[in-house]
Amino acid sequence: MSNEKATLSVGGKTIELPVYSGTEGPDVIDVRSLVQEGFFTYDPGYVSTASCESKITYIDGANGVLLHRGYPIEQLAQHADYLEVCYLLVHGELPTEEENERFRNTVNNHTMIHDQMSHFFNGFRRDAHPMAIMVGVVGALSAFYHDTMDLTCEQEREIAAFRLIAKMPTIAAMCYKYSMGQPFMYPRNDLSYAENFLHMMFAVPCEEYKVNPVLAKAMDRIFILHADHEQNASTSTVRLSGSTGANPFAVIASGIAALWGPAHGGANEAVLNMLNEIGDESRVEECVARAKDKNDPFRLMGFGHRVYKNFDPRAKVMRETAHEVLTELGLQDDPLLRIAQRLEQIALEDDYFIERKLYPNVDFYSGIILKAIGIPTSMFTVIFAMSRTIGWFAHWNEMVSGNYRIGRPRQLYTGYSPRDYPKKK
Ligand code: SDX
C-alpha cells in the first residue's frame, strides 16, 4: 500500500482516493468510494482498469515481459514442462521432485471421462466447429460434478483442477476424432501429457502409433506458452462468471466461449486462414495495405495486442519452435512460413505498425506449427483452450479462496429519461 493519495476535483468537490502499489507494474487508484460521491468511472474495454489483485502472472507490455509467479516465460518454456507450469500457476511455487511425481500420477488418474459423456458428441453434426463442441461438452462436465462442489473446500477445488487438467486433452482429441468419423482413442497413462494428447489425436485402433519426440516437445511448449496471461478477456470472463458462485466446470465453459472470438483465442485459426488467403509472398504488400486501410475491416491477424507494445515474448519462442518443427519434418521451405516471415518483416518496417506498436503476438506462428504437426485449423483454438484451462482455474481458485464480491459493473446511461406509456386512442 503506498501512502500517496489521488485528489479528484469534480462537481465542486475534492475527493481523496487511496493509491496502492504492487510488487511490479503501475500503481492503482482505488475508486470504490466514488459511487458514494455520486460518480462512476468510465472505461469501456477496461483499458486502464485493474479488476482485481493477483499474484499469478505479470505482464510488462512496454518491455515484452511475461512472468508466471515471477519466472520469465522464456525460462519456463526452456526448462519446465506443462504440468510443472500447471503446478506453479496453482500453488505459487515449482514442485519438488516428489510433488511433481504425485501431481502427474494424480492427473493420470483423471484422464478418462464418464463413458456416458461420449453420447453428447452424437448430438452434433460431424462438421460442427470443434469449439462449439468443446463449449458444450465441458459445460456438460458440470452435470457430472455438480453435487460435490463446495467452493469453500480447498480439497474439492483441487480435485476440480485435476479433473480439468486431465480431461481437457481427452475431450479436445474426442472433438477431432468425432469430426474425422474415427473412433475415440482412450488416454494412455504411460505417456507424457503432450505425448498422450498426440496419441489420442492421431492413433487409430488398428495399428501402433509412435509419437515423434520433437513434435511432443513442441506441443508441450505450445501448452506452456498459452497457459496463462493475466486478466485477458477469457480469464476476466471466468472471474466474472465465477464470482456468482457458479459450478467451476460451467465457469470454464464460459471462458472457452469467450476465447473463441477471432480478436482473442480465435486469432490463431484466423492467422492460418489469412496466410492461405494471401497464398503467395507476392501478395503480402497488398495484404499489409488492406490492414492499414481504415475503410477495410481486414486486420493483420496475429498482430497487435492490448498490452504488448513490444514483441510478445511468447511469439519469439513460438517462432523458434516453428523452425524446429518444420526442420524436423523437412518443411523448411513451407510456403506459409515464408509468407508469415515476409509479412512480419514488412509490417515491422512500416510506419503504420511502428506508430501503433503492433508486433506479432502469440497467435502469429502457433498455427504454422500446429498445421505442420497435422492438426486442422479448426482445432487451433481448441488447443489454446486446453492450454489456458489451467490459467482460468488458477485465477478462479485465487478469487474463490479469498474475499471476493460478485462482479457487477455499472454504465453511462444515454437512453430515454422517464416517459409515460401513450394513452390508448
Ligand atoms: C490474444 O489479452 C490477452 O492477453 C490476449 C492473449 C492471451 O494470451 O490471452 O494474448 C491472446 O488474444 C492475442 C491477440 C490475438 N488477436 C489478434 O491477433 C487479432 C488482431 N489484433 C487485433 O484485433 C488487436 O490488435 C487486438 C484485439 C489484439 C487489440 O486490440 P486493441 O488493444 O483494442 O487495439 P485497437 O483495436 O484499439 O487498435 C489500436 C490501433 C487501431 O488503429 P487506429 O484506430 O489507432 O488508427 O491499431 C490498429 C487499430 O485499427 N490495429 C490494427 C491491428 N491491431 C490493431 N491494424 C491492423 N491490423 C491489426 N492486427
Image (spheres, helix red, strand yellow):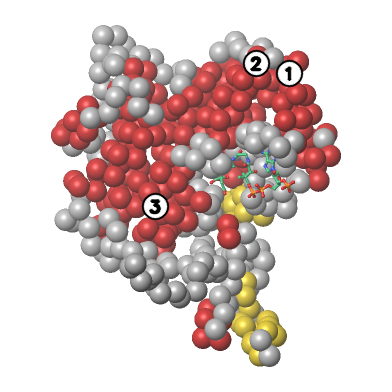
Asked whether residue 191 is in view, the answer is no
Instruction: Indicate the quadrant containing the C terminus: top left, top right, bottom left or bottom right.
Output: bottom left
Q: Which residue sits at x=65%, y=33%?
A: 298
Q: CA distance from mark 2 to mark 1?
A: 7 Å
Q: CA distance from mark 1 to mark 3?
A: 42 Å
Question: Residue 10: x, y in percent?
Answer: 68, 84
Residue 413 percent location from the top left of the image: 53, 69
Q: Quadrant of residue 296?
A: top right
327 in relation to 413, above or below: above
* Badge 2 amino acid: Gly
| Residue labelled with disc 1 | 283
Vertical relation: 338 (above or below) 361? above
The residue at the point 57 percent across, 20 percent down is 325
SS at circle 1: helix
Q: Nearer the viewer, mark 1 or mark 3?
A: 1
**Residue 411 position in % (x across, y down):** 52, 68
Q: Earlier in the sequence, mark 2 or mark 3?
A: 2
Identity of the amino acid at label 3? Phe
Whether the residue under disc 1 has CB within 8 Å of ligand 1: no
Label 3 sits on residue:
393
Mark 1 in CB contact with mark 3 (< 8 angstroms): no
In this picture, residue 99 sits left or right of residue 221: left
- Identified at 47% across, 43% down, the residue is 259
On the picture, is 323 further left or further right than 255? right
Which corner quadrant of the figure contains ligand 1?
A: top right
Q: Nearer the viewer, mark 2 or mark 3?
A: 2
Q: Secondary structure at mark 2?
A: loop
Q: In the drawing, what numbered circle is on residue 279?
A: 2
